[in-house]
Amino acid sequence: MYTSGGLYQTSVYATADNGCNSYTLSDSIRVYQTMANAGQDTILATGQAYTLRGSGGEIYRWSPATGLSDPNIPNPVFTPERNASFTLTTTTSFGCATTDLVQFKVFDGPEIYVPNAFTPNGDGKNDRFRPVAVGISEIRYFEVYNRYGQLIFTATDTYQGWDGNSKGRKEPSGTYVWRVTGIDFTGKQHIKKGTITLIR
């Protein structure tokens, strides 16, 4: 069994019953491989149209097909009403196939969901303050202020998040003010602000 595509040398050995005569036949074969990639798991808002991003083959089949604009193309469109998952099967013209799964969490929205505390202690759990933007196509501002009203963090996305540091120094435990401004997939502006507790 070959685990990756490529050109391989193969040999077949034949031996007579009495062991006196043997014959070896050698040849090369090419193995064609697919690498199905259904894209990254994603959070969506109810009613937000989304284009799937399949790659890694010549022939595509998404399942289940329900709700997809066309299950037999790499990038069909669907509009979720609830959590969903799709399996992508990619096939070569020689019949080699692989599969991949993509999952979608669907929340009421568009909305910006924000936690109330985080613990940047380096344990890999809740180390960054990250608002979750559902159905938001663009983040205009993501800002954090200290208790003196000084801007100590700013970004134009929420993925990286704030790690609790400012200008290379650790900010102390306490309450900080945040503000997020974003544009949703319908073009409407959303502005949210509140406080976050930093716990060390």
Image (cartoon, rainbow, N blue to C red):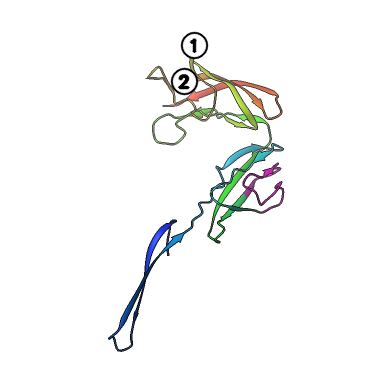
Of the residues tagged 2 and 1, which is closer to the observer?
1
Q: Residues within 10 Å of mark 1 (few under 14, many from 20)?
A: few
Q: Which residue is mark 1?
A: 150
Q: Which residue is mark 2?
A: 174
Query: Of residues 54 and 122, which is closer to you in this image?
Result: 54
Position of 194 with respect to 66 (left or right) is left
Query: Of residues 150 and 76, which is closer to you in this image?
Result: 76
Of mark 2 and mark 1, the one earlier in the sequence is: 1
State whether the magenta stretch is mostly helix, strand or loop. loop
What residue do we see at 54% from left, 22% from top?
156
> How far across and how far down the image is residue 181, in percent?
61, 21
Above or below: residue 102 compared with residue 164: below
> How far across and how far down the image is residue 90, in percent?
57, 54
Residue type of the residue flagged with mark 1: Gln
- Secondary structure at badge 1 equals loop
Q: Residues within 10 Å of mark 2 (few under 14, many from 20)?
A: few
Query: Of residues 84 and 69, which is closer to you in this image?
Result: 69
In the rendered view of the protein, which quadrant contains the N terminus? bottom left
Position of 66 with respect to 40 (left or right) is right
User: What is the quadrant of residue 177 in the picture?
Assistant: top right
Q: What is the C-alpha distance between the residues marked 2 and 1?
A: 14 Å
Residue type of the residue flagged with mark 2: Gly
What residue do we see at 61% from left, 26% from top?
138
- Secondary structure at badge 2 equals strand
> How far across and how far down the image is residue 120, in percent?
42, 29
Residue 124, numbered circle? none
> How far across and how far down the image is residue 178, in percent?
55, 20
Position of 40 with respect to 185 (left or right) is left
Membership of 187 in magenta stretch: no
In the rendered view of the protein, which quadrant contains the C terminus? top left
Q: Which residues are magenta?
A: 64-85
User: What is the quadrant of residue 17 in the picture?
Assistant: bottom left
